[in-house]
Image (cartoon, rainbow, N blue to C red):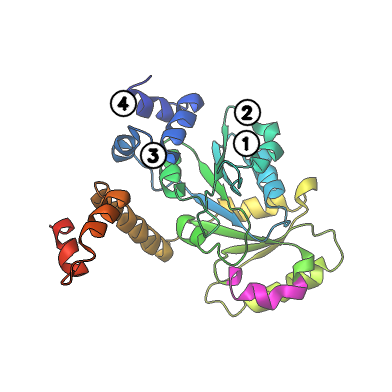
Amino acid sequence: MKTIPQYLSAIQEGDYLSLARVLTLIENSLPGSSEILKQLVINQQTPVIGITGPPGAGKSTLVNAMIDRLSAQDKKIAVLAVDPTSPFNLGSLLGDRVRMSAHFNKPNVFIRSVATRGSVGGLSAKIIEMTDVLKASGFDYIIVETVGVGQSEIEIAGLADITLVVLVPEAGDEIQHIKSGLMEIGDAFVVNKADREGADSFANQLKKMLHQRVHAVPVFKTVADKQTGVDELLAWLTGLEIQKNEKKLFLYTEKAFKLIQNDRMQDVVKAELQQEIAEVLEQKDFNLYRFIGAYLK
């Protein structure tokens, strides 16, 4: 097994086997993972593109098409495809990895499926750490595709530098419902499966609604499985100057709080705490707040 410096050197040199191993260590909080994270040389300039939207919108197909185009330009791309967690073993269902299998043998493409493991927000609990590992691995673009659970995916807006919301023409009937959640987080909207009836009308509806936003928000029409409209989307995307993401501050603050909280709680075993409380709970003058004082020192 490699040492931590050897792993860090290997991922910077493009060793995907080492990268996969490091991501496994991080995702499962295995020994050595915290030291690896502390020693990462993170390139904060690497653009993170978030792909979100309701189920069935064709997010994976769009990502597939984007990988095709970007890899043909010799760009180095990493994809974190966040899959729903299996209810049986807390593992990822790996659907996205199957759909993107055509890219596995490309030397400039790295794809990893990540299980949500019960995390809300459409993302995995370890997604920030895993994204930071990829930022330390020399990629030109990092694409994060969420599970597509709808309104609760707002986390992606904090993680990604650019958030694309993918919708289909049929979403026109529920556009007011969409407005209350995803409408506020998209830097651009993609009407996928635009060869279906009503696509032009829906795209125009979106543009009218987005006109109320402070900054101009483009709407693209794509048929991802036929590569239609993908070049226009990527031309906008790659020509974009990455803006400061105000939401990132709140996401990282929340993450820092949880990490500090976990570190300070690591010597507290809940079963032992329950036993100690059981021993004193029947005392007439039992005071919970005095009791926990011993843990707060």
Of marks 2 and 3, the one in the foreground: 3
177 falls in the magenta region: yes
> How packed is label 2: few (under 14 Cα within 10 Å), some, or many (20 or more)?
few
Of marks 4 and 2, the one in the foreground: 4
Which label sits on residue 29?
Answer: 3
> How packed is label 3: few (under 14 Cα within 10 Å), some, or many (20 or more)?
few
Of marks 4 and 1, the one in the foreground: 4
Q: Secondary structure at mark 2?
A: loop
> Mark 1 sits on what residue?
71
- Inter-mark Cα distance, 2 to 1: 8 Å
- Examine the image and state in which quarter residue 182 appears: bottom right
The amino acid marked with disc number 4 is: Pro
Q: Are marks 2 and 1 in contact (CB under 8 Å)?
A: yes
Which of the two labelled residues, at mark 2 and mark 1, occupies the earlier sequence position?
1
- Inter-mark Cα distance, 4 to 3: 18 Å
Q: Secondary structure at mark 4?
A: helix
Quadrant that contains the C terminus: bottom left
> Mark 2 sits on what residue?
106
Looking at the rendering, the stretch of residues picked out in magenta corresponds to 172-183
Which of the two labelled residues, at mark 1 and mark 3, occupies the earlier sequence position?
3
- Residue that appears at 63% across and 57% down: 148
Q: Is residue 39 above or below residue 167?
A: above
266 falls in the magenta region: no
The amino acid marked with disc number 1 is: Ser
- Inter-mark Cα distance, 2 to 3: 29 Å
- Examine the image and state in which quarter residue 216 appears: bottom right
> Mark 4 sits on what residue?
5
Which of the two labelled residues, at mark 4 and mark 1, occupies the earlier sequence position?
4
- Inter-mark Cα distance, 1 to 3: 31 Å
- Residue that appears at 15% across and 62% down: 293
